[in-house]
Amino acid sequence: MTSLHSERTFCVRPRSRTVSAPKPPAFRELRRTLRQDRYPRVWKPAAWPSYQSTLWQGSEREALEIESPLQGLTPPWKVMVMSDGSVTRHLHLLTGTPITVDCLQMADIGRDHAGLPVAAQHMAGGDALVQRQVLLRHMPDREPLVYACSWWKAEEVGQYLKDSSKPIWVSLSQERMELHRDIQFISLGHSSKLEELLGQSGPFWGRQYLFWHNRQPLTVIDEVFSPALDKYLGSSAPSMQPQAWKPGLH
């Protein structure tokens, strides 16, 4: 994953704004007002909480190696991190409560793709992208369990995400689309922004994958899992010391 951007992002806001309870700084920085069939225009790629330090990163095959840090996880954690099923559905089955989507941002970031994931840059080519950031929360306490950031071609996103309050998988399933989830890598790392958003200390397990449709990349998605899931899945702490990890980046 790339480093967190430091530049500030700007977008168009409506003239009136509903007064609500104060939000943590990360929410104030990331939240953007959604408009039907229209996305706020930002002039630089918006900040997204990628790892500031990556402890390990490897392909799906490398994650299955016996000396991968993933092998120290409980079987339920391995399923959560490597499953090609719906994360929202997994969370619902684990918690027994509804899972809500808290959309922090959905913005047109234009054609300046510097600092975005390589897969997102390749998918875009020279086209404008829309960036969407969400937290998946479980009810009733609204504890955040997963952070996700996705990138879509601006000219296509309206066809697939017609309701920003719904999880991506739900939106795409309702269209009866044939999809293939292609995991690019599994990762483990630290991020102060993610600690603030998720209310948990790192390191955090994450992954990046593509959805393919009609042999074309539809979206690139980064997901990061909160250690709050430990109460359902067991410990997410690696059982081996970093010097014992291989292969992959560490």
Image (spheres, helix red, strand yellow):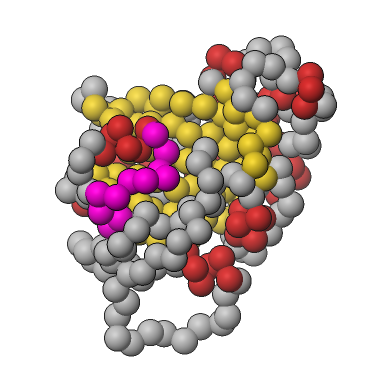
**Who's the residue at 29% across and 80% down the image?**
14
The answer to whether residue 119 is left or right of residue 158 is right
**Who's the residue at 58% across and 80% down the image?**
22
Q: Is residue 198 visible?
A: no
Locate the C terminus and report the quarter of the image it occupies: top right
Q: In this view, does 104 lie above or below 72?
A: below
**Who's the residue at 31% across and 63% down the image?**
42
Q: Residue 115: within the magenta? A: yes
Report the predominant secondary structure element of the magenta stretch.
Answer: loop
Q: Is residue 41 above or below residue 130?
A: below
The answer to whether residue 145 is left or right of residue 246 is left
The answer to whether residue 95 is left or right of residue 159 is right
Q: Where is residue 125 in the image (x, y as percent from the top left)?
A: 23, 36
Q: Residue 73: within the magenta? A: no
Q: Is residue 219 visible?
A: yes
Q: Is residue 9 above or below residue 184?
A: below
Q: Where is residue 50 in the image (x, y as percent from the top left)?
A: 54, 46
Q: In which quarter of the image is residue 190?
A: top right
Q: What stretch is highlighted in magenta?
A: 108-118
Q: Position of residue 49 (x, y in %)?
A: 54, 52
